[in-house]
């Protein structure tokens, strides 16, 4: 069966659905093709299942791009306030967690339902389980899928990145871009946790689930947010953010007591001992992390130079 549209959108994630909504509002006949059995699978796991759907302080400089002007244009045309208005239109309760990050009070499903509802209102059609077999272009685009053929003069590729293959991520979008001669920026991991070496994993990873505020730095960038110890290493907002700026061979500095003088109590004490250090550390770090850090890193002599 052949179907004709004005625009074909490949991918029913956040970007694809929002694109379909805005294109549909302009009167076009829109089709969204998705290989999975439901829309927005990555949306559903974002923000711990509550979807951190925007940040009220979002600025172009927060984005890493080969073309810095793209982020300026995109954010000027569709702002965080625009999406917040859409969330409020659908009466979805939300809250600011920290640093301008907005999360749903209930579930990320509120956001996928919002996007599906807006697609229906814009008369954008969503075709699930439509795995793409071939894309051709002559006078218009022809997309052959397991569900039939689709034609349109405009094609939007919103198939997402390579992260989380078990959620259906594939390199299809990159392959398609190469097919049509588009420039591809070499991909590398970003917004990812760090895996500790065996030695440090043995020291700390039994503390999995413990978190604390840190200042993570590398390559002239820094983030002050929570760090989470996992079964394999380090994660949490500070680590995920700094990972995007880290390059192989570079070091990462993690300040466990940002803007706090952790040695003041020790220096003021007449007796410098592990007990004095524990007292100082317990006021700043979670107790178990403080004790473990001292076990592994306490100086042999409690001198000012050692501290």
Image (cartoon, rainbow, N blue to C red):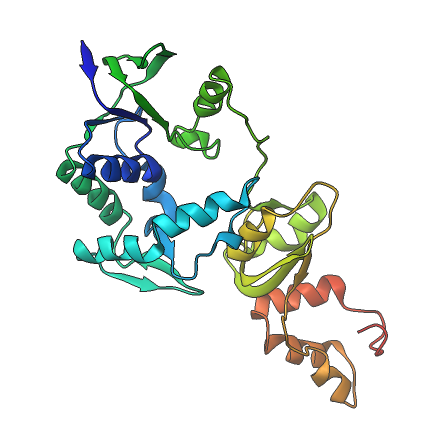
- The tally of labels here is 0
Residue 192 appearing in the image:
no
Q: At which x and y percent is residue 265? A: 70, 85
Give the residue at x 60% y 46%.
194
Residues 66 and 267: in front is 66
Residues 69 and 165: in front is 69
Q: At which x and y percent is residue 64? A: 55, 46
Quarter of the image containing the C terminus? Answer: bottom right
Give the residue at x 75% y 64%.
297
| Residue 71, above or below 264 | above
Residue 283 appearing in the image:
yes
Left or right of residue 89, residue 247 in this image: right
Quadrant in the rendering for residue 280: bottom right
Give the residue at x 26% y 34%.
20
Left or right of residue 113, residue 155 in this image: right
Q: At which x and y percent is residue 77? A: 35, 48
Give the residue at x 38% y 46%.
46
Left or right of residue 202, residue 116 in this image: left
Left or right of residue 147, residue 254 in this image: right
Q: At which x and y percent is residue 24? A: 20, 35
């Amino acid at each position: 069966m052949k179907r004709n549209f004005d625009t074909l959108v490949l991918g029913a994630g956040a970007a694809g659905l929002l694109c379909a909504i805005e294109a549909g509002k302009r009167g076009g006949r829109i089709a969204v093709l998705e290989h999975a059995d439901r829309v927005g699978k990555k949306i559903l796991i974002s923000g711990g299942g509550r979807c951190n759907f925007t940040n009220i302080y979002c600025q172009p400089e927060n984005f890493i791009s080969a073309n810095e002007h793209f982020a300026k244009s995109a954010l000027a045309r569709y702002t965080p306030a625009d999406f917040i208005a859409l969330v409020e239109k659908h009466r979805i309760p939300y809250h600011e967690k920290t640093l301008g990050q907005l999360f749903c009070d209930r579930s990320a499903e509120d956001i996928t339902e919002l996007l599906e509802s807006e697609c229906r209102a814009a008369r954008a059609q969503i075709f699930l389980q439509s795995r793409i077999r071939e894309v051709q272009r002559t006078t218009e685009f022809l997309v052959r899928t397991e569900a039939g053929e689709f034609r349109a003069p405009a094609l939007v590729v919103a198939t997402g990145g390579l992260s989380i293959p078990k959620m259906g991520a594939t390199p299809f979008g990159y392959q398609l871009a190469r097919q049509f001669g588009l420039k591809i920026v070499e991909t590398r991991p970003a917004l990812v946790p760090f895996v500790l070496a065996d030695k440090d994993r043995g020291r700390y990873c039994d503390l999995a689930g413990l978190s604390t505020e840190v200042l993570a730095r590398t390559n002239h960038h820094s983030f002050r947010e929570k760090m989470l110890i996992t079964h394999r290493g380090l994660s949490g907002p500070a680590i995920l953010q700094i990972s995007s700026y880290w390059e192989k061979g570079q070091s990462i500095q993690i300040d466990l007591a940002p803007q706090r003088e952790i040695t003041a109590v020790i220096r003021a004490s007449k007796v410098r001992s592990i007990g004095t250090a524990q007292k100082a550390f317990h006021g700043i770090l979670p107790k178990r992390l403080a004790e473990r850090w001292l076990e592994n890193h306490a100086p042999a002599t409690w001198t000012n130079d050692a501290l």
